[in-house]
Amino acid sequence: MAKKRKISKEKREAISREIRTLLREYKETGKMTTSRATYRPRSLKHAQKIAAAIAYGKYGVGKAGRKRKKKK
């Protein structure tokens, strides 16, 4: 079984803040925009999942934060 790393309080707060910002944007415009892509979730629940994946990826936490190995 893989070891679970503890996330620092600052990182947890930053992730929460990022998710909050993305969800606020979704509620106002119906879409979420990042530097890489624009997401148009079907519902608020779907928007929450996408926002969490974006935030965890941005801060390098969990599966979303892993970098892919390039295939040769």
Image: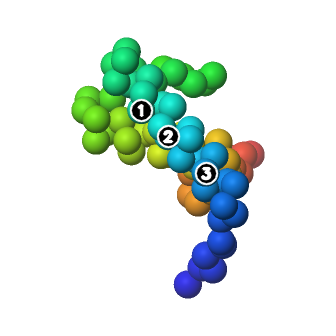
Circle 3 residue: 13
Can you see residue 6?
A: yes
> Residue at image x 61%, y 51%?
13
Badge 1 element? helix
- Residue 11 versus residue 20 in the image, above or below: below
Q: Nearer the viewer, residue 63 or 19?
A: 19
Residue 66 is at least partly visible in this image: no
Q: Label 3, secondary structure: give it.
A: helix
| Amino acid bearing label 1 | Leu
Amino acid type, mark 2: Ile
Along the viewing direction, whichever of 25 and 64 lies nearer the viewer: 25
Farthest residue, direction left: 43
- Quarter of the image where one finds residue 49: top left
Q: Are marks 1 and 2 in contact (CB under 8 Å)?
A: yes
The residue at the point 72 percent across, 46 percent down is 70
**Residue that numbered label 1 is attached to:** 23
Q: Residues within 10 Å of mark 2 (few under 14, many from 20)?
A: many
Mark 1 to mark 3 CA distance (whole Å): 15 Å
Find numbered disc 2 in the image and state the secondary structure of the residue it sits on: helix
x 51%, y 31%: residue? 21
- Quarter holding the N terminus? bottom right
Residue located 43% across and 39% down the image: 50
List the residue tagged with mark 2: 19
Q: Earlier in the sequence, mark 1 or mark 3?
A: 3
> In the rendering, at what x and y percent does residue 39 appear?
43, 25
What x and y, as percent, mark residue 19?
A: 50, 40
Between the residue at mark 1 and the residue at mark 2, the CA separation in whole angstroms equals 6 Å
Camera-nearest residue between 15 and 33: 15
Colour scheme in use:
rainbow
Q: Position of residue 52 (x, y in %)?
A: 47, 46
Inter-mark Cα distance, 3 to 2: 10 Å
